[in-house]
Amino acid sequence: MDVLLSAIALIVLAPALVAIALSIWATSAGPIVFYQTREGFNGKPIKVYKFRTMYTDRCDISGIAQTASEDNRITSIGRFLRRKSLDELPQLFNILKGEMSLIGPRPHVFGMLAGGTTYERLVPYYTTRQTMKPGLSGWAQANGLRGPTDNAAQALARVDHDLAYIENFSLLLDIKIIWKTLRQEFLSGTGL
């Protein structure tokens, strides 16, 4: 289902993907799409694709230096793409390749900080979230738990939501998450 839906989405969204790519190319120097190495299924490294939203000379390719709301590294078009979560659309190719799913715990970069320490240190059961393929969206994101993880309680809540999803996943829950993601991210623009 993931492969079929991601292929359909790529075909339907092709004009928008081209428009986004052209707007990035026209407004700042650097690659249109980049990748970060992130934690995949069972902790295996995967290259997660994203539209570039930062100035090339200011970005942190490792992803450990998280983005803040008024971050001067973000381009003008990048701010819009992040607000609408359109920068994540190239991950449809990760889904098509079988590395990710439409819904699942979001893939983190290795060594990601949460509350001033690594996730592994903050949450002893953190790696349990890697027992499922990472997703383009997830239960945590559908419930507003996205953005910077400098708050330890919010970071812990994010992992707990991921684990709740893994324990209760179903087609109905996936449909609910897809609907909430579309409504919150693409329509209202709550992304960072």
Image (cartoon, rainbow, N blue to C red):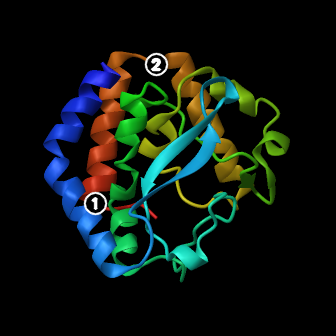
Residue for badge 1: 188
Amino acid type of the residue that numbered disc 1 sits on in the rendered structure: Ser
132 vs 7: above or below: above
User: What SS does tag 1 mark?
Assistant: loop
Labels 2 and 1 touching (C-beta < 8 A): no
Residue 185: x and y in percent read 33, 54
42 vs 149: above or below: above
Rendered residue at 56%/22% (across/down): 132
Residue extending farthest front: 30
- From where the camera sits, is residue 87 visible? yes
Mark 2 and mark 1 lie on one chain; the one further toward the N terminus is 2
Please tell me in which quadrant of the rendered image residue 158 appears.
top right
User: What SS does tag 2 mark?
Assistant: loop
For the residues labelled 2 and 1, the Cα–Cα distance comes to 26 Å
Rendered residue at 49%/28% (across/down): 99
Could you tell whether 147 is left or right of 45 in the image?
Answer: left
Q: Foreground residue, 141 or 72? A: 72
- Kindly identify which numbered label has been placed on residue 169: 2
